[in-house]
Image (cartoon, rainbow, N blue to C red):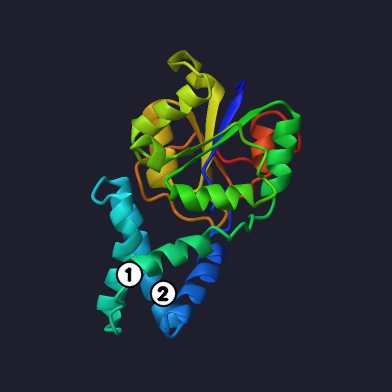
Amino acid sequence: MSYTHILFDADDTLFDYPKAENHALSRTLTEAGIPCTDEVMKAYQTINQQLWRDLEQGLVKQAALRTERFARLVQELGLTPWTQVEEISERYLELLGEGTFLLEGAYELCRDLNEAGFHLAIITNGIKKVQANRIAGSALAKMFEAVIVSEDTGYSKPHPGIFDYAFEALGLRPSDKSRVLIVGDSLTSDMKGGLNYGIDTCWYNPYHRPNTLNLRPTYEIRRLAEVKTLVGVGGSPSVDH
């Protein structure tokens, strides 16, 4: 397949989101006078992950998600209520935007694809302010022709609306779908979205998670460097089809 455009998910595909989250959450809790224990961290992560799944299904708006996760944390753990949940949320987002940590091989992959002439873009459900700061502050800052954020489009992956927006931003037409590959770690947003839209999909699955959904990504890889073989840039890693 002759691909010309590659859409990358951001978190857990190119960027180390758990590391950024731990950095931001531990400082936010400490500044708020909340004990930064494993129990609190795990409770937040569980709440946050559920809310992002709800976002994918259109059950919650992103604006509400920002503060709702902290409100639920307070309630679940019986903590002294924060009188300014909005301020806590804004501080967390500010710190999260500092998390420019990349996953192993992310920089080398994007650099090599750029040098080979591929058109790269990011397509993410993340919060615009956070993602803009993280990308701008990272080594990947100048490698993408477009950064498509759900907040700008009004749609979240897997909704086809965000892919329509991406195609328009990249100057692509519906007839160009065979030239586009999406690479991401999420079956429910990246793979489902790509498959429903009619573009090829590459599931980045470094931890060998089972595919429990009735989805068949075009490719499945364990290491980011394997993307280069898929698009003909070189190397010889194994690829699961």
The residue at the point 60 percent across, 24 percent down is 3
User: CA–CA distance between discs 1 and 2?
Assistant: 19 Å
Disc assigned to residue 85: 1
- Looking at the rendering, in which quadrant would you find the N terminus? top right
Location of residue 229 with respect to 100 vertically, above or below = above
Of 76 and 94, nearer the camera is: 94
The residue at the point 39 percent across, 42 percent down is 151
- When asked about the image quadrant of residue 157, the answer is top left
Q: Badge 2 is on which residue?
A: 42
Residue 237 in sight in this render: no
Residue 195 in sight in this render: yes
The percent coordinates of residue 10 (x first, y second) are: 53, 47
* Sequence-earlier tag: 1 or 2: 2
Location of residue 104 with respect to 68 vertically, above or below = above
- When asked about the image quadrant of residue 158, the answer is top left
Judged left or right of residue 1, residue 48 is left
Location of residue 75 with respect to 220 vertically, above or below = below
| 1 vs 2, front mark | 1
Q: Of the residues shown, which amino acid type is indicated by label 1?
A: Val
The percent coordinates of residue 17 (x first, y second) are: 53, 59
The residue at the point 62 percent across, 35 percent down is 144
Mark 1, Cα crowd under 10 Å, few <14 / some 14-19 / many 20+, is some
- Looking at the rendering, in which quadrant would you find the C terminus? top right
Q: Of the residues shown, which amino acid type is indicated by label 2?
A: Lys
